[in-house]
Amino acid sequence: MYQNFQAELDWARLHMPRTQKAVAELPELSHIKLACNMHLDLKMAPLVEGLLSRGCEVFLTTCNPTTVQDDVVDYLVKKGAVAHAWRDMDDAEWSSSFDKALEWQPTHLCEMGADLTARFHEISSKGASVPNVKASLEATGSGISRLNGMSPQYPIFNWDDLPVKEGLHNRHMVGLSAWQTFFQTTHLTLHEKVVVVVGYGLVGQGVAASAKAFGAQVQVAEIDKARALQAKYDGWPIVPLADAVKTADIIATATGASGVVHAGHLDAMKNNAFLLNVGHVAKEIDVAHLKANACHTEPMPYVNAYTRNGKTVFLLADGSMFNLTAGYGDSLNAFDVTLAVMAAGIGHIVGEGESHERGLYLLPESAWSSAL
């Protein structure tokens, strides 16, 4: 992926001073086995190599196979990490990575999406042996939603809902990086385009605001009454998705839920409309319907054209998280804040966090405020 990996890594380190500081403040970690299920792109390298330098054993899996950078994984393995992750690994290979991570007997987990925790509890419910996990971190809203339906067997600390995570990364960076990636991928701008943002959580709010800033005519599709009302107060027209798909030039899903854009929506979309997803869940769009019922071509990298009955829909990055599959995701300086908090959170779960009762907790301010 990277033409000069070492130069880009040096550049990332230079612009991520908070992460460097947070890692330097971690305790000695030679007694820790940390299984990480997360995006494995260049920005993660400073954290993982920092953990390794503190003596931590690290197992790497991915929360999304389409966002893995193989040269990053190769580099971290050479530095001492164990990994079972590569770009575009199939569903069976991806699923097996969760089992391999748990078979490695981790003492702690660091997750984006709760896949390891879900597999842990699935195995435990069958009476099979599970590792002695002492504490875990969770970084995503979709992961927290999954955890709310479980009875965790160890303390899990939610840092997705921290103001520095939801207010910076979720609200500002995802939308900005999504549209930057759209420009680079399609060679188009948003001028004269009707953009429908599906979902008005913090990510959707950022997607809508950035689209307007870049010249789009923005509408919001939101089924939650409170969020729809908030969108109205923010000045956005609220539209039923079933109607909006007929006139939208671009539809962006940002819900973190599955099956949001279904077959009926896809069949009703106007000719040459674009469809992209920036939510954590790769199944927000019924891609299987397009693949089964339309002719597929790829006129540009990451632009998947599905044509049926003389009408084409351009699905970007085949429905995967667009800004990190086809682009570089957050800026280094913004992600530096996110990663520093993540490092501080790791410090918490290997220390005071271990003593908490099993359950789901918000990562306390005392654990992360010094990272800013």
Image: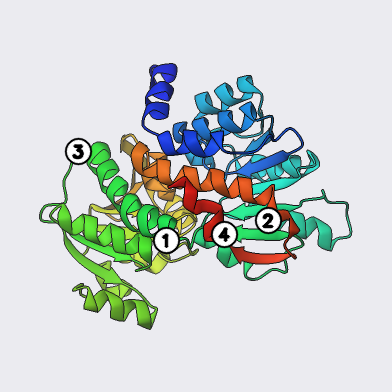
Q: Which mark is residue 163?
A: 1
First in sequence, mark 2 or 3: give its number: 3
Secondary element under disc 1, as helix, strand or loop, is: helix
First in sequence, mark 1 or 4: give its number: 1
Q: What x and y, as percent, mark residue 315?
A: 35, 49
CA distance for labels 1 and 4: 11 Å
Contact between marks 1 and 2 (CB within 8 A): the answer is no
Q: Determine the residue positioned at 60% across, 39% down.
A: 26
Lateral position of residue 53 relative to residue 186, left or right: right
First in sequence, mark 1 or 2: give its number: 1
CA distance for labels 3 and 1: 34 Å
Q: What x and y, as percent, mark residue 248?
A: 22, 63
Q: Quadrant of the N terminus?
A: top left
Secondary element under disc 3, as helix, strand or loop, is: loop
Residue 184 sits in which quadrant?
Answer: top left
Q: Determine the residue positioned at 16% across, 46% down.
A: 189
Q: What x and y, as percent, mark residue 232?
A: 23, 78
Q: Which residue is mark 4?
A: 363
Q: Which residue is mark 3?
A: 187
Density class for disc 4 (Cα within 10 Å; few <14, some 14-19, many ≥20) is many
Q: Determine the residue positioned at 54% across, 40% down.
A: 65
CA distance for labels 3 and 4: 41 Å
CA distance for labels 1 and 2: 20 Å
Q: Which residue is mark 2?
A: 353
